[in-house]
Image (tube, helix red, strand yellow):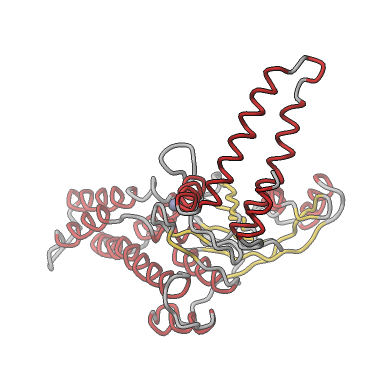
Amino acid sequence: MKTRLEFPYIKVYIDNKNKVRYMVHKNQSVKAMLTQESVGNLLIDFALLDLSGYKKRTDTLTKGIPDDFSAEDAVCFSVFSTEVYEIAKLLNDPHTIACMYLLGKLDTVFSADISDTEKITTAVKVLEEVLILQEIFSDGLAMCCDVDFENEGISPSGLFLAFTGKYLDFLGYHLMTGTAIAPTKDGKIDFEMIDKVNSDNITDHKEQLTLIDDVKDNRAKIVTYTALCDFADLLYFEFTELLKQGLQIRKCKLCGKYFVLQSRHKTLFCDRSYAGKRTCKQVGNKLEYDRKVASDPLLQEYERIYKLHHAQLDRDAQKESPAVFGRAKNVFLKWSKQAQKRRKSYLSGKIDAREFQSWMEQL
Ligand SMILES: [Zn+2]
């Protein structure tokens, strides 16, 4: 009977709006909650990692192990085990969660009741597994989720079959689920409190229910979570959820990195920051628009009129007496709101060029 999860692990909850909450349990005392608007980002961040430095050092370590390797010599064991952990820690900065799982797995290897030689050879395999997982899931993302990848209209379930057919280690792969009691707040599940109420330290159900009563309004719901006990679990969960939810990904047209497409939107840019404070989406949309303006006389005319109105606002605002302060700005905002609405309709094709032009002629 499985009643306790081994550290490190993550309990993941998906609410009815597909928002994802990862309850990260690094060890008994270190816990954190990570909330994401959509599933898939942790997988994408991992697939995008440049692991060349990690690979180089792992390869060097592997080549350094002679066929008749014996780590029973204490110095030799210490040198190899130190290097194993140094390599693992390379992941910490770019992907804290990958690193957390990797260190947890290495700790298990090094505390196992096996010879020192076996510990080192197994640990190296654990390091190599990270590279294999990156290869498998990068391919999976490109093959099954990339909106621009030609997959001949195959359904998500067909794509999933193609993936498991190619990577047999994931054929029949399964994840553990669990049940938790969740306090509610205004009728909604209070995810902030789930962990407190479902602490592994509470074994008495009366105590658990009292805790819910103490913290909330006597209402509790039962929710299920998926337990991610290994890094492969996390990647598999993210990947299959993307497919299950029919979410696709795209390479940002500005930075070239994958991002999850929310709904069926024709978004071309991601939300990562781009050269400073602004995001790819802000910079990219502006560039796209400037490009359109450059080739469209109607948009050029729109921009000219917009600037005229803005200049008028500046003049009127300067002349304003304290009694009517803000009036010019309100007039401008009212006008610009409907002007931008027209422009948006034109750009999205809701109104045609003639209609857009005749609107501008009336101004
Ligand atoms: Zn981007």
Q: Quadrant of residue 138?
A: bottom left
Vertical relation: 133 (above or below) 215? below
- Give the residue displayed 32% in from the left and 63% down from the top: 131
Horizontal side of 73 relative to 228 (left or right) equals left
The quarter of the rendered structure image containing the C terminus is: top right
Number of numbered discs present?
Answer: 0
Horizontal side of 1 relative to 273 (left or right) equals right
Which of these two is toward me, 191 or 80? 191
The quarter of the rendered structure image containing the N terminus is: bottom right
- Can you give x and y, in whole percent of width and height, for residue 301 in the image? 56, 46
- Can you give x and y, in whole percent of width and height, for residue 276 in the image? 43, 37
Horizontal side of 343 relative to 132 (left or right) equals right
Which of these two is toward me, 45 or 54? 45
Outermost right residue: 218
- Can you give x and y, in whole percent of width and height, for residue 273 in the image? 46, 44
Vertical relation: 205 (above or below) 170? above
- Give the residue displayed 67% in from the left and 46% down from the top: 339
